[in-house]
């Protein structure tokens, strides 16, 4: 029974992908792109993102690389490509994140892709031999720069064809 409407019911459907042993995964080049605008200050936003990124950091291996890019009114590379076994350095960069300002998502996305290209793990003959991904954590409130969905989608599609994927982690309501 739904907790907010007893005349309705909730159904949870879960799909689980195949588990692959961490040791058999290809090296990963990850760019954490974090929205640090003012709207990200509530506890269910930036603090939650920081906690999630730290949890992900525990899973990184020496062959993995992580960069950290932020955006608000402007953009900043907080952490240049760093090996995954330098967890203290990565966590220190995550700890320094704080919220404030506007939301120039376009500039942040472009800077994150530039970092991903700079540290890109080249594909071998088998395209499954590398992971190059931008992980965007945001509440979705873009208000500076390009905010048109179609233009942003085109940018993401071009980058995917160039071998860099995007995953979006939505926080807040």
Image (cartoon, rainbow, N blue to C red):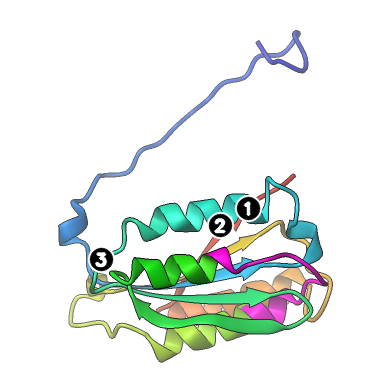
The residue segment tinted magenta is 95-108
Answer with left or right where residue 36 lies relative to residue 93: right
Residue matched to label 1: 47
Q: CA distance from mark 3 to mark 1?
A: 24 Å
The residue that appears at 28% across and 69% down in the rendered structure is 85
Q: Secondary structure at mark 1?
A: helix
Q: How busy is the neighbourhood of tag 3: few (under 14 within 10 Å), some, or many (20 plus)?
A: some
The image shows residue 165 at horizontal and vertical percentages of 45, 71
Residue matched to label 3: 61
The image shows residue 79 at horizontal and vertical percentages of 49, 80
Residue 159 in magenta? Answer: no
Q: Is residue 145 above or below residue 153?
A: below
Answer with left or right where residue 143 lies relative to residue 152: right
Q: CA distance from mark 1 to mark 2?
A: 5 Å
Q: If you read the primary sequence from the N terminus, does the residue marked by circle 2 or circle 3 appear first?
A: 2
- Is residue 135 among the parts visible in the rendering? no
Q: How busy is the neighbourhood of tag 2: few (under 14 within 10 Å), some, or many (20 plus)?
A: many
The residue that appears at 74% across and 74% down in the rendered structure is 72
Residue matched to label 2: 50
Answer with left or right where residue 85 lies relative to residue 53: left
Residue 101 in magenta? Answer: yes
Q: Is residue 95 above or below residue 160?
A: above
Q: Secondary structure at mark 2?
A: helix
Answer with left or right where residue 47 lies relative to residue 63: right
- Is residue 26 among the parts visible in the rendering? yes
Q: Dots 1 and 2: beta carbons under 8 Å?
A: yes
């Amino acid at each position: 029974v739904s907790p907010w409407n007893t005349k309705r019911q909730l159904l949870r459907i879960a799909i689980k992908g195949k588990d692959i042993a961490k040791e058999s995964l290809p090296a990963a080049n990850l760019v954490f792109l974090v929205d640090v605008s003012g709207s990200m200050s509530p506890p269910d936003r930036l603090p939650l993102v920081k906690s999630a990124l730290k949890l992900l950091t525990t899973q990184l291996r020496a062959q993995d690389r992580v960069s950290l890019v932020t955006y608000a009114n402007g953009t900043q590379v907080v952490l240049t490509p760093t090996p995954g076994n330098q967890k203290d350095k990565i966590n220190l960069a995550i700890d320094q994140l704080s919220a404030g300002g506007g939301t120039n998502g376009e500039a942040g996305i472009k800077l994150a892709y530039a970092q991903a290209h700079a540290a890109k793990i080249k594909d071998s003959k088998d395209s499954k031999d590398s992971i190059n991904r931008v992980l965007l954590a945001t509440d979705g409130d873009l208000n500076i720069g390009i905010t048109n969905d179609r233009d942003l989608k085109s940018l993401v599609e071009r980058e995917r064809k160039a071998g860099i994927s995007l995953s979006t982690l939505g926080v807040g309501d």
